[in-house]
Amino acid sequence: MWSALVIPTFLFLSCFSVGSAQIPGSVTHGNDRYPPFWDQINGDIAEFPVQDNKIIIDLWKYKDRLQIYKILIRESNKYFVQFGKNDTGNVLWGLTLLYGKLYKTGRFVKPSNSSVCAYEGEFPGCISIDSGWGGFNFYVLTIYFLAAIESGFLRNISQEIVFLSPEEHRSYFCYSIEECRASFPQAMDTAKKFYQYLQSRKILSIVGGTPVYNTDKDTAILYMWDAHQALIDIGKPMFNDIFQYSSATERDFTFNFLLAIEFCAAAIYRSFFESSAEFLVGFPHRPLTDEDDPILPSDFNIREKALMSSVKLISNINQMTGGSFLTVWKKAMNVSKITQFLGRLVIKNLLLIPNT
């Protein structure tokens, strides 16, 4: 019965929410949709400092993580040229733009002292090791990057990579291929599948001097989402009680948002640049405080309120059904490409994402 009702239920919810979507918040176009300081790096491993013939990367610096994102985007762009102009069809844009949004909205600060690692708008800063969002992002990026090296996808790295590892919370993180594979072999293998799939692609044609590979976008997106979920699953039990958030309300929003992303992943939601940028228009512009619950204050715009309300609604329904709502949704999305299309349509309406 649930299987027959899950799509109609979501359609009803999306129609209910769309009532306020007729006047969406303004959508900003231009360079400010890119992560802060994106134009200041070129996506070259040579930009990192070298000591004793080792490449030194500080994963608790915003710019160092951003550099890794740009390396992965640049090295994989050739497989996605047919899906968007000017390299906007890369399926890694969703992860990259969310990273920039987390930094810009102050979610990498030290929760007990919001002036530490704050986004100042002028110079790239740090990522607090006490930040829950910073911890989740650590695993998403680090294992993606290490899997790209281990799989041979990044062939131009001839020197050893050294990640700087502060002693604080040292046991909760892995800082090398050996450490991450020993602790999380399944997650490493899942991330490697994404790169192995890309490496298996063949050139179909040459258009304007540019090779076009036989990449199937649904397959690439599926592997990307599978890896993302495997990495988030690592962080959930670790960061649930140990790491800090600015408030219980922000913590709840974090886990509600991550649950909503699971619904997106099951529907193979398009993680290209444009669709990801539109999705994140509603991401709240600051961490939530306990005073924001249950009434959202006036400094949030309509898109922000809609996204926060929608992810909370999805979480409440899933909790009331003992988790079966997500389970049945995933089964429904596996039926056919038609149900996946309907699922994406529902998600766009429910989260107030306008067509682009």
Image (cartoon, grey):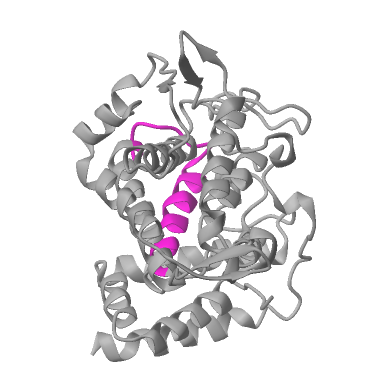
Above or below residue 90? Residue 188 is above
Residue 347 among those drawn in magenta: no
Residue 276: where, in percent of width, then height?
59, 62
Name the one closer to the observer, 119 or 157.
157
Q: Quadrant of residue 182?
A: top left
User: In this figure, what is the number of numbered marks?
Assistant: 0
Quadrant containing the N terminus in the rendered view:
bottom left
Task: State the residue at coordinates (60%, 51%).
Answer: 97
Q: Main secondary structure of the magenta part?
A: helix
Task: State the residue at coordinates (25%, 28%).
Answer: 178
Q: Quadrant of residue 66?
A: top right
Residue 76: where, in percent of width, then height?
51, 52
Name the one closer to the observer, 47 or 264.
47
Task: State the residue at coordinates (36%, 40%).
Answer: 143
Task: State the residue at coordinates (42%, 65%).
Answer: 202
In this picture, residue 340 sits left or right of residue 276: left
The magenta region covers 239-263
Above or below residue 21? Residue 25 is above
Q: Quadrant of residue 222?
A: bottom left
Above or below residue 27? Residue 140 is above
Residue 38: where, in percent of width, then height?
69, 41
Name the one closer to the observer, 189 or 253.
189
Quadrant containing the C terminus in the rendered view:
bottom right
Residue 225: where, in percent of width, then height?
39, 60
